[in-house]
Image: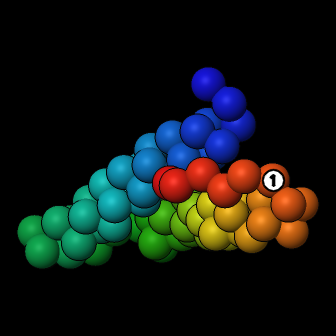
Amino acid sequence: MDWKHAIRHCHRWLSIIFTTLVVAIFATLGAGHEPAAWAYYLPLAPLALLMISGLCMFFLPLAAKWRGGPRRAP
């Protein structure tokens, strides 16, 4: 597995983790419970990593174009 596929794979898993955390917070609120204040900050770490990996995936085709190499379809 090359690093481009590894970034895409990590991005997918980070999105699953982020979505699960957000759904868990909303489910807790919907059940009438107030989660601890730190629980609202849990999704921020996966969100930051999602932003970094998303930007990497966004710029990969541009970098290939700048280098003059062959472009691969995602």
Percent across and percent down for residue 24 are 26, 60
Percent across and percent down for residue 35 are 34, 68
Q: Which of 28 and 73 is in front in this view?
A: 73
Identify the image quadrant of residue 54: bottom right
Percent across and percent down for residue 17 are 41, 50
Q: Nearer the viewer, residue 68 or 58?
A: 68
- Residue where numbered disc 1 is placed: 69
- Image-based side of 63 in relation to 74, left or right: right
Percent across and percent down for residue 70 are 72, 52
Identify the image quadrant of residue 61: bottom right
Which residue is rendered at x = 64% and y = 69% of the image? 58
Which residue is rendered at x = 42% and y = 56% of the image? 15
Callout 1 secondary element: loop
Q: Nearer the viewer, residue 1 or 41?
A: 1
Residue pushed farthest top?
1
Q: Please tell me how many numbered marks the rendered image carries.
A: 1
Q: Nearer the viewer, residue 54 or 13?
A: 54
Residue 63 in sight from this viewpoint: no
Residue 67 in sight from this viewpoint: yes
The correct choice, above or below, for 8 with respect to 18 in the image is: above
Which residue is rendered at x = 10% and y = 69% of the image? 31
Q: In which quarter of the image is the N terminus?
A: top right
How many residues crowd mark 1 within 10 Å: few (<14), some (14–19), many (20+)? few
Residue pushed farthest left?
31
Colouring of the image? rainbow
Residue type, mark 1 in image: Gly
- Image-based side of 25 in relation to 36, left or right: left
- Image-based side of 54 in relation to 13, left or right: right
